Image: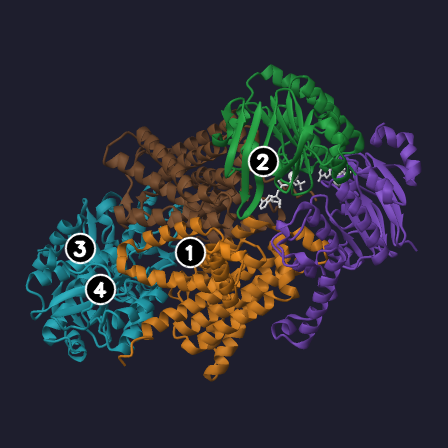
Chain colours: A purple, B orange, C green, D cyan, E brown
Amino acid sequence: MPLLDVKEIGITFGGLRAVGNFSIQLEPGELVGLIGPNGAGKTTIFNMLTGVYKPTEGEIRISGRLANGKKPYQIVNEGVARTFQNIRLFKNLTVLDNIKTAFHKDMRYSTVEAVLRLPAFWREEAEIDRKARELLGLFNMEEDADTIAANMPYGKQRKLEICRALATSPQMLFLDEPAAGMNPQETRELMNTIHFIRDKFKVAILLIEHDMSLVMGICERLVVIDYGMIIAKGKPEEIKTNKKVIEAYLGS
Amino acid sequence: MGMGVVNNYMTGILIFTGINIIMAASLNLATGYLGQLVLGHAGFMAIGAYAAALFALNTEMPDLPTLVGGMAIGGAVAGLFGILIGIPALRLRGDYLGIVTLGFGEIIRIALLNLPFTGGAAGLRRIPKLVNFNILYVAVVLTITFLFLFVRSRHGRAIHSIKEDEIAAESVGIPTTFYKVYGFAVSAFLAGVGGSLFAFYQSILDPRKFTFMLSVEFFIIVVLGGMGSITGTILAALLLSFANEFLYSVENFRLVIYALLLITMMIFKPDGLLGTREFSLNGLLDRVKTLVGKSFPKSKR
Amino acid sequence: MLKVEGLHVYYGAIHALKDISFEVREKEIVTLIGANGAGKTTTLHAVSGLLSPKAGSIRLDGHDLMKTPAEKIVGLGLAQVPEGRRVFARMSVHENLMMGAYLRKDKAAVEADLERMYGKFPRLRERSKQLAGTMSGGEQQMLAIARALMSKPKLLLMDEPSMGLAPILVDEIFKIIQEINEMGTTVLLVEQNAHKALAIAHRAYVLETGKVLMEGDAKTLLDDERVKHAYLG
Amino acid sequence: GKTEQPAEGGSAGSETGGSQGGTIKIGVLTPKTGDLAQYGMAVENAAKLAVKEANDAGGINGMTVELVIYDNEGDATKSVNLFNRLIENDKIDALLGPVISGTSLAVAPLADEAGIPMITPTGTNEDITPDYPYVFRACYIDPYQGQIMGKFASENISAKTAVVMVNVGSDYSVGLGKNFKVSFEEKGGSVLAEENYTDSDTDFKAILTNIKAKNPDVVYIGDYYNAVGNILSQAKEIGLDAQFLGSDGWDGVQVDYIDVAEGGFFTNHYSTKDTDPVVQNFIKNYTDTYNETPNALAALGYDGALILMDAFRNAGSTDKEAVLEAIRTTDLNGVTGHITFDELGNPIKDISIIKIQDGDMVLETKLSE
Amino acid sequence: MTQFIQQMINGLHVGSIYALIALGYTMVYGIVKLINFAHGDILMVGAYVGFFALTAFNLPFGLALLAAMVLSALLGMAIDKVAYKPLRNAPRISALITALGVSMFLQNTFRLLFGANPRKMPAVFNVQPILLGDLRIPPLTIITILLSGACMVGLELIIRFTKTGKAMRGVSEDSKAAKLMGINVDRTISITFAIGSALGAVGGILYSISYYQVEPYMGMMPGLKAFVAAVLGGIGVIPGAMLGGFVIGGVESFTKGYLSTTWADAIVFSILILVLVFKPSGILGKNTKEKV
Ligand SMILES: Nc1ncnc2c1ncn2[C@@H]1O[C@H](COP(=O)(O)OP(=O)(O)OP(=O)(O)O)[C@@H](O)[C@H]1O
Ligand SMILES: Nc1ncnc2c1ncn2[C@@H]1O[C@H](COP(=O)(O)OP(=O)(O)OP(=O)(O)O)[C@@H](O)[C@H]1O
Ligand SMILES: [Mg+2]
Ligand SMILES: [Mg+2]
């Protein structure tokens, strides 16, 4: 059974069919790229998969369970995490608190246990504090734990957002243009990071990106859409030479 | 007699300041932490006050059970209304929610004037006077401690993340719907408790008290102290109370000066007295150190 | 045309620009490159008047920009494609473009320019009634560029115009920049895509943590080992 | 001279404790801000006038009277705090106020406990005085005026049907309306409807339109003159011409609304036509000092101050017990009539029925229960 | 039936005043996202100016109106400069507090200056009502409705067709981007305050003529109602403010006439809450969900 099984989903915005007949499967540990021209519907697909939009047609299954119409937080509980095209951090919280917030679903203690500071509170808090710092450590960000998120440079904010997504211990990670606004040097580092994430956390990654060096460099297979429809699928090498894709997206 | 330092007058002011602290701190949960504009907090207070008073007037129990029971009932009924008002909050954002809560506060006030069992314009009288300075002091400490511990837990983090970015909060698995309603309910519950304390101290309830302006008073304390700073709330409540008492010496100009004071303070400290920080002795020491450091820059090298 | 000298900018305690100097001559494309947080955006904001520097001088055609409010600077013939696009989210695409022509009085010419923009970005014509805020990231980027061009600027400041654009459009954008430059518009370009930027620019400045690290002819920098290593990948 | 001006505002800084140094301190609690300020200011002005007159005439038993006035904003909480401030910081000898029933109810038990003689000039609620020996009032209690007007409507002008308009935001208005209804119905009249409104209402056309449709003989409005003036004006606008009746709150309506109030009757404490020099002096001096005609609230505030000063004079000292006893045995010609107190602390005085006729206020009759 | 129409006319009368005041709220909100709690008090100031112009200076109504509009406009601009402009980059809630401060300041200053006792506004249009069968339509009602209507149309024209209108829309969306279009943001905001306050003054004068009184706290209730009207219609949307005003006026009049006066405000607020629950951005407000 595939981790993610999407069948023929589509959505319409006031007459505009932004996405139609979109299907995709994701196996554990895969690294797949979703590319296509501006306005093709990539972000919209992410939004449907994560419960931000409700698809007007089709069906989404995560680990075999139907996920249509679930709320975003319920999708997270199904093991899906994402980042956003425009970074969305908890800007005024520290880096550490950004991460800790994302551990919410793994914690159990009640309000009473919290305000009476019963053992459950201390145990779980100590546990996530350790896990959060460990996670930051993996991304070489332990130094920044107490920095306010908004005060960090752009590149680190992107990294933090990914880190926060990982804190929900997902099986699948959706990244929306993680390399936007990064220079080639930083993009190269990001490639390593993504590889590292996949290997370390054993997650499947679905990635939207316009930076071809990154997409072609790390994706195992690609799905190309235009006007909300899939126009090509395949290995990077195949896509690179696909005429339709060149014409609509890559340019000469 | 003759000691005069803490006389009835001072005690009275401290008691009402204490009630203001409970009210503003509970409002701070909804506004400062959850990030929702609430302009009808006096409504929750009124509900708590009337519920507790009606309970006390209709039972014959010893003082302590009446007090505790009244507080619990006042808090619970107000909390219930908090859930009720939390539901539109799910769909409304920012200022729209502000106006809904304002409307809610007014509806409550009008209801108190018109319902058969609230005494109408005359209000309720002869409510047992069960609260004194010590009891109130304990209540304030408990409320503040509760809030402090609550916001520093996973629930508090979840509530805070909604203020920061609701969409992002959902995306990391926070059930935002639940936590919005929960935040409202807790805030309203504490306001109800504040109301019941008020009823048991004042011993009469006058519906004129619970106007929009009272809600505004709490709101001002929260913003002035710093949204998301509980110690800031305490500081601001004390400051405003004493400023107000002091200004009685310029009686006729009192509110004019008070208004100017507000405007000036906001302009010079737009984030409130403490911003989102909490007052702590350690923090104070650190600040003193950096200040000292700044004035002797060479010593740094 | 634009001359910046000894510029210092602070965000509170953060010293973001430390003594930056550069110039842009008439009809040039000049590019600023540098890593994240180097101060590129800050520099552009200082020039267009969106923030006030602590010290230094900025002169445009002999006008002192340090004392000129942003809207007056625009009146002098400057336009900016801002970082993060900043389209008017609740206005339609068409209205956004017309906002770009806010200061212009030549109605007929504005209409003609509108047509030109629609010609260059057919997607915008297609969606001229859509609210800008609901457009995709890349679509908004196109709109931001077209909107800036609608003011017929003499000097165009562009902050990462290729960000979020599909490869085919990236090429297109760089072509457009060259085109408008050839038609007489001076361009100050900030780019992460240093390769492409240097390829079309006449001269370039490399910024690093708020300082100008290197400057010179774009072609020379393109071949510079250090630049290659740090920014070209 | 200037120095003899009555003290104005809270002299919070004043060092003189108690009544040494030859001063009698009277605290005043009154709303000076907020929407009740218009009533509070009348009381304050009148009290200041009374005190100034007394001081100008040589004071009370050689002592000067000093007022310490605080703004309670019509709020019970603030009243309690300020009362504590008055007794502890300002060390007052007696209290004039608070003005509104709600605040008077809050302060009465405290005043009684502290043994400070208190006179509320205008707190009409029945419950203010009975349990508290130290607490008195200068005004009628709610039932009284309503009853008298009900009787008057039925017996003197033979009304058969009535509508009662009640400001539910004011227990004064609620009490009057209730008692008018009871007494009017007792005498065989029928009350067609009770129309309620609130403090914040300014637009009465909707209910007046309804009243017009019912076509009652009389409409009773127990409320203050500003609201009444507004209501009567709008009644005229929509062409409702019933006989309007009212209470002492109407006093003042003559200033701006005499034309629309023409023909109306209201119960009052006194008549401006009363030739008694106390009344005429008061009207003249008040008008001279404040450039406005005094209303019933002013008259009551003035009398409140007179009663207290009279008691100090008769007691011959500021001893609380002696003053209390002196108030109990008050026998005084005030602006609002000849005043004595019953055992509950309520004044015993006649009620005048005033008619507004030809642009003037005419004493129609004097009634008592 | 007559009664029904009569109530409707009453409703239109109040409603058009609410609408006028609501315009000021909505414009200022639209542009600086500030609930200008002092707006109700600007209305009060306008009414006082009108009162003195009519009584102390014996000016004709037109001139009194003009004087009130001009002075209120200046006051509105001054308030913006002193109390709001320093907080443009601060959290929005801080400006809300200064707005409350300004409101308190104006109320109490006017109380000190002119006393707490209401002044009687002279009856300006004191002519016989127009009688249509049993219906009585006071001339004041007609004038109020016409004058309000004219102001609203004028405003809509300004916003639609002038450069200033365009600038207002730009600033309301994104003031930094607006600057980059060459829009003078500060001036635009000043103009907005001026227009909103002038309309408020018209509302204030009509209100005080309709209800005969001018007093320092008179702005609170109509201000609150007008604010509710603006939100109901969709705050920031000009036609929404007008619609909201008329809806509130109508609901108020009919509930007072047929249900209960004392519950009228509660019913108005309940309707507001219900409408917002089903249409979270008001009747005419655009519900633009944030694009993620
Ligand atoms: N809420 C909405 N209302 C109307 N149209 C919308 C809405 N959201 C998206 N669209 C349209 O749907 C299309 C797909 O948008 P989407 O954001 O998914 O594109 P994308 O593939 O992510 O593009 P980009 O690479 O530029 O980010 C676009 O044409 C966009 O204008
Ligand atoms: N509003 C702000 N408040 C505080 N610091 C800021 C602010 N804006 C920028 N900075 C800081 O100033 C420095 C320069 O930022 P700037 O945005 O100019 O860099 P940039 O070169 O444009 O980077 P990027 O490639 O990420 O756009 C950075 O260290 C940044 O963190
Ligand atoms: Mg996208
Ligand atoms: Mg930048």
- Looking at the image, the residue that sits furthest to the bottom is B62
Q: Which tag is nearer the camera, tag 4 or tag 3?
A: 4
Q: Is mark 2 within 8 Å of ligand 2?
A: no
- Looking at the image, the residue that sits furthest to the top is C108
- The residue at which mark 4 appears reads as D68
Q: Is mark 4 within 8 Å of ligand 2?
A: no
- The residue at which mark 1 appears reads as B213
The CA distance from mark 1 to mark 4 is 27 Å
Local crowd at mark 4 within 10 Å, few (<14), some, or many (≥20)? many
Instruction: Determine the secondary structure under disc 3.
Output: strand
Q: Nearer the viewer, residue A88 or A188?
A: A188
Residue C20 tag number: 2
Q: Residue B292: percent from the left, percent from the top?
A: 47, 59
Q: Is residue D350 visible?
A: no
Give amino acid for label 1: Met
Instruction: Determine the secondary structure under disc 2.
Output: strand
Q: Nearer the viewer, residue C17 or D24?
A: C17
- The residue at which mark 3 appears reads as D364
Q: Residue B239: percent from the left, percent from the top?
A: 40, 62
Give amino acid for label 4: Val
Q: Which tag is nearer the camera, tag 1 or tag 3?
A: 1
Instruction: Determine the secondary structure under disc 1.
Output: helix
